[in-house]
Structure formats: C-alpha cells, structure tokens
Amino acid sequence: MTLIDGKAVAEQIKKEIAEEVSRIVEAGGKRPHLAAILVGHDGGSETYVAAKVKACEVCGFKSSLIRFEDDVTEEELLAKVRELNNDDDVDGFIVQLPLPKHISEDKVIETIDYRKDVDGFHPINVGRMSIGLPCYISATPNGIVELLSRYNIETKGKKCVVLGRSNIVGKPMAALMMRKGYPGDCTVTVCHSRTANIAEECRQADIIIAALGSPEFVKADMVKEGAVIIDVGTTRVPSTKTKSGFKLTGDVKFDEVAPKCSFITPVPGGVGPMTIVSLMKNTLLAGKKEIYK
Amino acid sequence: MTLIDGKAVAEQIKKEIAEEVSRIVEAGGKRPHLAAILVGHDGGSETYVAAKVKACEVCGFKSSLIRFEDDVTEEELLAKVRELNNDDDVDGFIVQLPLPKHISEDKVIETIDYRKDVDGFHPINVGRMSIGLPCYISATPNGIVELLSRYNIETKGKKCVVLGRSNIVGKPMAALMMRKGYPGDCTVTVCHSRTANIAEECRQADIIIAALGSPEFVKADMVKEGAVIIDVGTTRVPSTKTKSGFKLTGDVKFDEVAPKCSFITPVPGGVGPMTIVSLMKNTLLAGKKEIYK
C-alpha cells in the first residue's frame, strides 16, 4: 500500500511555481497577482483565505485581501467584483464561499470575468471543461488529477466510482475522469444519496473518489483488494484526543480500508493541501495569460 | 413491452407549442423567430435544416434560412453570427454542424450570444446545465428526458448506463440523469471505447441510453429483463430492401432486445423526432424570454 502524500506533492509544486515566477520576474515579466474577497468572519473561511495568502507568498505571487463585513449589500460586492474585473494588475481573483444568505452566490460568480475566474466556478469554465476546451479547472478536482498523475496511477479503462454529485467536486471529478487521455479514460459511475446500493458499486471500483462529506462512510467491506482510494471528505468530528476538541475526519474508515488499497490519501495531508496548490497553478496560468488572452 | 412512440409524442408537443404561439400572438405578443445558418450542401445537413424549417411552420414560428457556400470564410460567418446576435427580431438561431474544416466550430459556437443559443452548445449553457441553473439544454438529451417523463418512467435510484461520451449526447445525458429531481436521481455510469467490459456494465442497467453510433451494438445478452432502452444511434447501413439503398439503423439490435424490455425506442421514430421538437421548445422559451431576459 502506498500512502499518497499530498502535502509533499503540494510543497514540491509550490517550489516549481516559485522557480517559474522567479524566472518570469527576472526576465522582466509581471509577477502574478491573486486577489481574494472575504465577506464576514466565518472561522473556516478565515483559515482558508489565510492559507491562500500564505501560499501566494511561498509561490512569489502578489496577493491582495479585500474584506467586507457580513452586512455588505449584494450591489456593493458586485461593484467590487467589476472593479477587479477591470483592474489590469489583478490576474485572477476569488470570492471566498459561502456568502451571507442575502447575497446570490450564482450572481456573484457569473459577474466575475471568466478570464480571471481562477476558482473555475464560472459557467463558462465549467462548460469548457465539460466540452474539453482549455479552461480554469476547479481546485479540488484539479488537485486530485494532479495526485493521480504524480503517482503514475493507471486510469485508462479503470472503473472509477465517484461518491457525491456536488458542483465543486463530484460532477467536475466525473467529467475529468471520463475525458480522453491521461488521467482519464475511466468508466465513471456517479453515486449519491439516491443510489440504491452504494456498497456494491464501490466493490466494483478500481478507483474510488469519496466526496460525500459523511465521516468514515467507506468501510473495508466496500473496497476491492488493490483499489485506489481518494478521500475528499474533511468533516470536523468532536474528539477528546486533540487540543482543539475536534478531529478532521475523511469519508473513508482509513485504518481498516488502507491495508486493502494499492494507493490511498490520508486525511489530513492528502487532497486538502492540493486544493490550494491548484488555485496557485491557475493563478500562474492567469498571470501568463495561458488559457485566455 | 411498451414501444416508445417518439413520433407521436413529437406531434403532440408541436401541437401544444402551436396552441401556445396562437395564444401569444392573439394577445399581441411576438411570434417566436428561429434563424438557421447552413453552410454548403451536405445531404444530411440539408435534410435536418429542411425538417427544422418545416417544424417551425407547424409550430407557428417565423423562420429564416441563411445560406453560405462551402468556401465562406470564417470571418464572414462570424460577421453573420454577430449580426443575428444583434437582430432584435431573431429570438434564437442555430448554425448547422458540421462546418467545413477551415472554420472553427468552437469559435463559431462561442461567438453566438448564449441568450440566443437554442442548440444549447455554448459553454455557458453547457456549464449552467451542469451546475443546475436554467439554460438551453441541447436537443437530443432534452428530447430523451421528455420521452422518459411523458411515459412516466421511474428514474429515482435506478442504474442508468450511458454508452458514449460525446459532447452532444453522452456527457449532457449523464449530467441530466444524475441531477436532483425527476427525471433524474439515477446512479449514472458512462461507458465508452475504453471501457473494459461494456456488456457487463449494460447487464446491470435499469436504463440504457445508447449513443455510440455503432449499429446493433447492444445485443439481447447485454440487457437485463425489464430494462428501459433508449436508442440514439442513427447509422445509415446499406440495404437492398429500401428504395434509397440504405436503412437507418440504431445502436440496439431491436428484434432480439425488444422482447426483454419494459420500454424501448425504435429507430427511426423514437429519439429522432424528439430532437427537432426540443429545438422548437427552446425557440419558444427564447421567444418568451423565459430563460434569459
């Protein structure tokens, strides 16, 4: 069994990005600039945004953090989005989700210029990914594809079961795993809350990508000998063993599943660190104007 | 076994559309207007476009056919697309595919204003469908969903196997069958040329949607007793029994598969007639500005 070390891969990729940024800047090119809009003070969002700002430093990017209080109006937020759309110094930007209920996330996302949509959430980027055109691919699916590729995991003709049909993981993951080429060319099955027999579907899988947000859902008896397991779940489960009082728990019952696998990602330290790195990769692409002019 | 009569359903829907158009026009509203651009004289394209123009008549739509010769330049074609984008009288339009090789289909499609893209091929419409936002859904998948719905075929929790991963059928079909609601909520598997054991995948399916373009690929021993079979294939196979010298042949070996099914679409007369009707439905939506203002 090989443990997929997302943390190490993420560090390696950040190093590669930093080297490329150095070369660009030395050659007189522009330092990539990522802006992030953060509304309110949600603990999770604060943590994610801080980690993104820190990753920008490591990669040698310029970063800007724009804060609004919870009571910002939709129109104020949209005005800032339009301002960033028109700011030539900003190569890409994100609006950290979730947003307060009085603001339409769909409207905010659709207002972002798709050429600066480094989160890959704009319908144009989602559509272009589905069709197979160059685009910004959203962070988690892109990070998983990168892990499969860095570990040379065979995908062609393999059965891949995706657990979950969310817009940010399940659906794009399915699209990526079924596309032509590597990683891809999988026979993909998408399971969800309405699936009649998830255990049986999983037992047939060569690759399971678990993104249900249901702690320790995947048990050993649901996994084929030699399967590849990618665990996207990160649920905070109360714990007496940690100082914080909780423990990040994946969708896979790691201790019993790991011995049966050929490859498995741990939680934490698997998919998680790759997510921010994917955003960094998109920011580099945006800085280089590689996807869109 | 129930034969799904796509022709009859299509006639019924066209009648419903015509009635609604009458009411709109009587109330002083605008008659929906569909324009079609046809490049060259490909036999299949001529037939399809003629059928679309005829369907417009039946539905009470205004239609315009714009022709170019095979040697039209990409820029001339794009100029016409932009003209139609800006023509307030045109509610929706299509560019009949395929286009000559010197013209980029992707570029043409992306130039169409997505609010008039009644074929549903623009990345914005593809992306919005994937995310679950209102949009123009492309004709063949939309027609199939309509057939399932008109025949009250249960889909929730059913295993649906989609054969083929094309942009115009396989991928959108998978997205529609897995979405929340009815028809939808299926556990969806997408199979294609790289799938290791298509026969075994098919045998597990409650619903098979065959869109490989491989005549009579699906045999009786690949089908579970009581399955629902939707046959999207329409390959011209040489025949001594027809005047034209060929016979439209589906992806399913109908004679041996039909007795095992609960529902099955014939070829011709199943999915085919629904495709044009879907375009009519999108044109009506465009005329009413129901999806986009």
Image: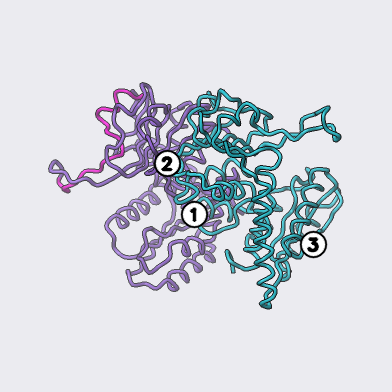
Chain colours: A purple, B cyan
Please give the label number shown on residue A99.
Answer: none
Question: Looking at this view, is B73 or A260 the one in front?
Answer: A260
Q: Residue at x 80, y 47 (%)?
A: B47
- Front of the two marks 2 and 3: 2
Chain part drawn in magenta: A243-261
Quarter of the picture holding the N terminus of chain B: top right
Q: Judge from the rendering whether residue B174 lies leftward or rightward of residue B271; answer left or right.
A: left
Report the residue marked by disc 1.
Answer: B132
Residues flagged by tags 2 and 1 on a common chain:
yes
Label 2 environment density (alpha carbons within 10 Å; few <14, some 14–19, many ≥20):
many
Label 1 environment density (alpha carbons within 10 Å; few <14, some 14–19, many ≥20):
some
Inspect the image, locate mark 1, and give the three-letter code of the amino acid beneath it: Gly
Please give the label number shown on residue B64.
Answer: 3
Q: Is residue A245 magenta?
A: yes
Q: Residue at x 54, y 36 (%)?
A: B262
Counting from the top left corner in percent of width and height, residue A217 is at 29, 37
